Amino acid sequence: KSVSNQRTCKCKALFCRFHFFLMSTAREKYASNLMTLTKDVDQHKKELNAKKEVCLKLATECRKTDEEIRVMRKKVSALEKKLIEAENNEIVRKKKKSSANWMWNLVWLFLLFVFLRVIYTR
């Protein structure tokens, strides 16, 4: 019976050693895979942070561009107002000039009438 127990113990010990070997190999593979995954995650974090920086820079540039557009719109609006005012002043100036021309035309017409009257009365 003791020989049988010794064989059983040897078999169990051999099985335990084989199991330990398999488990340690699996543990090493797991640790290696975990390290690889950790490196991949770190690399992806770096890439995401770089992309985030680019996005933040673009957002800042967009805000600056929006502000520049607002400023330019205000300038355009002011220039349009000045242009409308200048056009209105030009229209008023032309009306005054045309009314002054009518007045001069009436004066010349009156002088012509006086001149013709003087000539025909002699």
Image: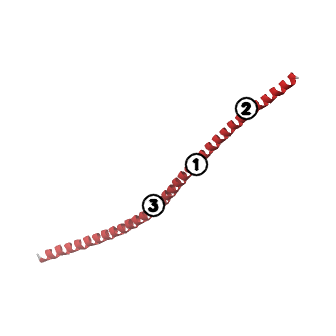
What is the crowding at mark 2: few (fewer than 14 residues within 10 Å), some, or many (at least 20)? few
Q: Which residue is mark 3?
A: 52
Q: Quadrant of the N terminus?
A: bottom left
* Residue 23 position within the rendered picture, expressed as x and y whole percent measured from the top left: 28, 70
Q: Which residue is mark 1?
A: 78
What is the crowding at mark 3: few (fewer than 14 residues within 10 Å), some, or many (at least 20)? few
Amino acid marked by disc 3: Lys
Task: Describe residue 35's horizontal placement relative to residue 78 as left or right.
Answer: left
The label nearer to you, 2 versus 3, is 2
* Residue 39 position within the rendered picture, expressed as x and y whole percent measured from the top left: 40, 67
Q: Quadrant of residue 37?
A: bottom left
Q: Nearer the viewer, residue 92 or 45?
A: 92
SS at circle 1: helix
- The vertical placement of 102 against 69, above or below, is above
Give the residue displayed 47% in from the left and 58% down from the top: 55
Ranked by sequence position, the earlier of labels 2 and 3 is 3
Give the residue displayed 75% in from the left and 30% down from the top: 106
Q: Nearer the viewer, residue 3 or 60?
A: 60
Q: CA distance from mark 2 to mark 1?
A: 36 Å
Ranked by sequence position, the earlier of labels 2 and 1 is 1
Discs 2, 1 touching: Cβ within 8 Å? no
- The vertical placement of 29 against 74, above or below, is below
Q: Nearer the viewer, residue 106 or 82?
A: 106
* Residue 95 position within the rendered picture, expressed as x and y whole percent measured from the top left: 68, 36
Q: Which residue is mark 2?
A: 102
Give the residue displayed 34% in from the left and 68% down from the top: 29
Q: In the image, which disc is placed on residue 19?
A: none
